[in-house]
């Protein structure tokens, strides 16, 4: 018998979206298992991973969904967004087009997800400082304009990954409680 299961107060579904190869799967592994997998597509076919956290005394099971590569075929379906309370919208700070496409992903969220969904814009691969192609200020401006939270992360060294997820989970808790 799993006693932790019994005490869960809430399950929050959070989806991870963004262009291919920005690091979505790695961000999820970093948060759920504190791992960075060199064989990056080992989780293909796995729909979600979970991590249970405590926020304001409540036990919250975060159920984090991965597209498992569907975005390559522009085939992320509305089923993927169904019931999602949060979204991590990821781009790669070294690949300008992945940031230019963020507006399209926001539109996709506005079309398919609940209007109260909490969205965190994430500039990933912040460890690759010499290859930066997206200035932080551009992303800050976009996020402010669209009412998104924003963070730069590195799934590789773990920088800001937990804090970004915690921010979203706290915000969701604030919305539903
Ligand atoms: P996805 O297609 O968005 O799920 O991207 P993946 O998680 O498969 O990552 C794509 C590639 O970027 C892989 O080669 C990862 O090892 C690499 N990667 C992911 N996150 C980071 C990061 O924070 N820093 C660096 N340097 N590489 C990363």
Image (cartoon, grey):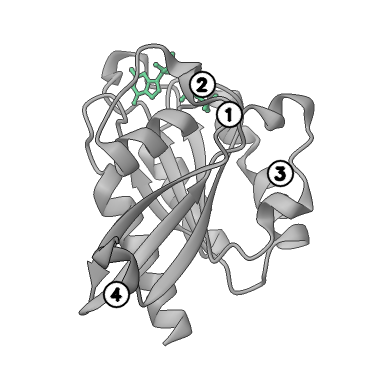
Helix, strand or loop status at disc 1:
helix
Q: Residue 130: horizontal and vertical position, in percent?
A: 29, 14
Q: CA distance from mark 3 to mark 4?
A: 39 Å
Which of the two discs, 2 and 3, labels the residue nearer the N terminus? Answer: 2
Q: CA distance from mark 2 to mark 1?
A: 6 Å
> Disc 2, disc 1: CB below 8 Å?
yes
Which of the two discs, 3 and 4, labels the residue nearer the N terminus? Answer: 4
Q: How many numbered badges does the structure rendering display?
A: 4
Q: Which numbered tag is attached to residue 98?
A: 1
Q: CA distance from mark 2 to mark 3?
A: 16 Å
Which of the two discs, 4 and 1, labels the residue nearer the N terminus? Answer: 4
Say whether mark 2 is within 8 Å of ligand 1.
no
Q: Can the viewer see residue 67 in this picture?
A: yes
State which image quarter holds ligand 1: top left
Q: Which residue is mark 4?
A: 7
Q: Residue 131: horizontal and vertical position, in percent?
A: 36, 14
Helix, strand or loop status at disc 4:
loop
Q: CA distance from mark 3 to mark 1?
A: 10 Å
Q: Which residue is mark 3?
A: 104
Residue under the point 28% across and 20% down? 129
Q: Can the viewer see residue 92 in this picture?
A: no
Q: Which residue is mark 2?
A: 95
């Amino acid at each position: 018998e799993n006693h932790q299961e019994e005490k869960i107060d809430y399950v929050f579904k959070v989806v991870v979206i963004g262009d291919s190869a920005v690091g979505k799967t790695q961000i999820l592994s970093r948060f759920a298992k504190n791992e960075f997998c060199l064989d990056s597509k080992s989780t293909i076919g796995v729909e979600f991973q979970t991590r249970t956290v405590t926020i304001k005394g409540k036990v919250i099971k975060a159920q984090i969904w991965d597209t498992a590569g569907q975005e390559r075929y522009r085939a992320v379906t509305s089923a993927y967004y169904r019931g999602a309370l949060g979204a991590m919208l990821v781009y790669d700070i070294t690949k300008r087009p992945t940031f230019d496409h963020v507006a399209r992903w926001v539109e996709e969220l506005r079309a398919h997800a609940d209007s109260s969904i909490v969205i965190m814009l994430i500039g990933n691969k912040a460890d690759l400082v010499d290859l930066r192609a997206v200035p932080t200020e551009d992303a800050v401006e976009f996020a402010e304009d669209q009412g998104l939270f924003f963070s730069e992360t590195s799934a590789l060294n773990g920088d800001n990954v937990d804090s970004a997820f915690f921010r979203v989970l706290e915000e969701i808790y604030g919305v539903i409680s």
